[in-house]
Each structure stands twice: as C-alpha cells, then as structure tokens.
Amino acid sequence: MIKIKEKLETAKNAAPEKFFTLKRRDSIIAQYPERYLKRFRDSVITRTKDTLVFNNIDTVVIKPFVPRPVYKPSQYVFTERDGHVTISLPRALEKTYTIKFFEDDNTDLFEIKKVSKTQLILDKSNFHHAGWFRFELYEDGNLKEKHRFFIAKDF
C-alpha cells in the first residue's frame, strides 16, 4: 500500500512532458516530445545540412542546406593544367564563331573574329596577368555563351 502511494505522489509531482513544434519556413510540420528531439542533437550542435534552430522556447525551425554555387568550366573555352586557354568548337568548320575576351571588370582585352579550327590553344601570356577573365562566344552573330575562366599564377 505504501509503495502505491509513493508512485502516485511521484506521478503527481512529475512535470508534464514538453512538446516542440517543428516548422519549415512558415509551415508546421509536426509536434515532437522533448525526448524525441534529443535524437536531433548532432544537427543542432554541429550544424549539419539540415540544421535545427530554436525560434522560440517551444518552436524549432528546420533550415535546409543551400549549397553555394560551384564554378563549372565552360565546355567551349577552358584552361588546361599548364594554364593555356583551350577553345574547343566542334562545329567551327560549319558555322562562324567569334570570341571576345574581357578582364574580370568587363574591360576589353582582344577579339578573335573568325575561329576556323575546331581546336585552338591560346598561350596564357596573351592575358598579361593571372586571375579571372570573361569571354563571350558568338555563333553566326548570336550570343551562344557568356562565361569566365581562371588563369593560375606561375610560381
């Protein structure tokens, strides 16, 4: 009888279980008890791809991972390992291609009026310094691609 009374008293003194609201942007996804939220502890501490952030005392917001844009080289104008700029135009014999090269701040460098070969290699010394350069590739007078490339510094 005494054991039953002790269990009843501890049950009366126990705090009710705390629930957290899980949101993504403005939408409520679910409500989880506190013990379930402990499973996401590593996400909160280490800020993994989908990090949980406490918005209020009882509201948790999911911040989805948004990757930074990664530079993807052009398939037509790119730099080789040795630093030379390669222009690869498979249809250069059929169509008229023009390429304009610019500094990173869009000041003109030089222009190749008619590319007559499918594969063309430009020496990196044509670009006077290392860094980012921009180009515009025109096919029969129409802009086909506007992109950039990087020439690394020689040590």
Image (tube, grey):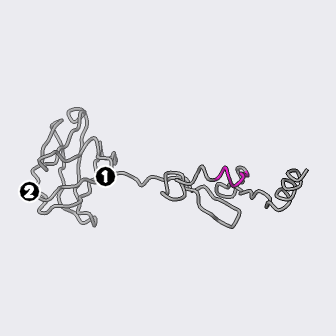
**Residue picked out by circle 2:** 125
Query: In the rendered image of this protein, does residue 150 appear above or below residue 141?
Result: below
Q: Is residue 69 magenta?
A: no
Measuring from the top left, give residue 103's x and y in whole percent: 23, 63
Residue located at (49% from left, 51% from top): 49
Measuring from the top left, give residue 155's x and y in whole percent: 8, 59
**Label 2 neighbourhood size at 10 Å, few (<14), some (14-19), many (20+)?**
few
Label 1 to label 2: alpha-carbon separation: 20 Å
Measuring from the top left, give residue 145's x and y in whole percent: 33, 47
* Type of amino acid under label 2: Ser
* Type of amino acid under label 1: His
**CB under 8 Å between discs 1 and 2:** no
Residue 14's quadrant in the figure?
bottom right
State left or right for residue 77 relative to residue 16.
left
Determine whether the residue tagged by mark 2 lies in a helix, strand or loop. helix
Residue range corresponding to the magenta coloring: 31-37
| Nearer-N-terminus badge (1/2) | 2
Q: Nearer the viewer, residue 155 or 5?
A: 5
Q: Nearer the viewer, residue 138 or 3?
A: 3
Q: How many marks?
A: 2
Q: Nearer the viewer, residue 51 or 28?
A: 51
Determine whether the residue tagged by mark 1 lies in a helix, strand or loop. strand
Query: In the rendered image of this protein, does residue 53 appear above or below residue 79?
Result: below
Residue 147 image label: 1
Residue located at (59% from left, 61% from top): 53
